[in-house]
Amino acid sequence: MQTETVLNRCVICEKLNADGLEIMGKWICVSCETDMVKRNVDDVQYWYYVMKLRQLLNQS
Ligand SMILES: [Zn+2]
């Protein structure tokens, strides 16, 4: 069986990636997702992700 690779555009880094997951209808690539979970609240990059996600969720 042949599986076709589907590329999705990540809402965080805006790169096309085949591996990732959908969170509340928004697609996030696996590298952003793993990067996000390993950060903690005193990390600036964490808040960048939070803000980005909040904006995206407010759009729909
Ligand atoms: Zn990404």
Image: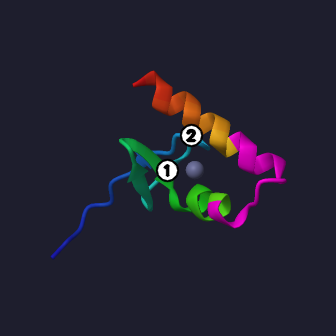
Distance from disc 2 to disc 1, alpha carbons, whole Å, reads 9 Å
Q: Nearer the viewer, residue 25 or 18?
A: 25
Query: Looking at the rendering, which quadrant does residue 26 occupy?
Result: top left
Q: Which residues are magenta?
A: 37-48
- Up the image or down, 2 lies above or below 40; here it is below
Task: Report if the beta carbon of the residue with label 1 is closer than 8 angstroms to ligand 1.
Answer: yes
**Residue at figure coordinates x 46%, y 23% from the top left:** 59
Query: Looking at the rendering, which quadrant does residue 41 occupy?
Result: bottom right
Where residue 6 appears, as percent x and y from the top left, is: 33, 54
For this view, does 20 lie left or right of residue 44? left
User: Is 46 one of the magenta-colored residues?
Assistant: yes
Task: Describe the element under mark 1 as helix, strand or loop.
Answer: strand
Where residue 20 appears, as percent x and y from the top left, is: 45, 59
Task: Report if the beta carbon of the residue with label 2 is closer than 8 angstroms to ligand 1.
Answer: yes
**Residue at figure coordinates x 20%, y 71% from the top left:** 2
User: Is 56 one of the magenta-colored residues?
Assistant: no
Crowding at dot 2, Cα within 10 Å, few <14 / some 14-19 / many 20+, comes out as: few
For this view, does 5 lie left or right of residue 29? left
Q: Amino acid at mark 2?
A: Glu
**Residue at figure coordinates x 66%, y 44% from the top left:** 49
The mark found on residue 14 in the picture is 2
Q: Dot 1 corresponds to which residue?
A: 28
**Residue at figure coordinates x 38%, y 44% from the top left:** 24
Give the quarter of the figure containing the N terminus.
bottom left
Q: Amino acid at mark 1?
A: Ile
Where residue 51 appears, as percent x and y from the top left, is: 66, 35
- Up the image or down, 13 lies above or below 42; here it is above
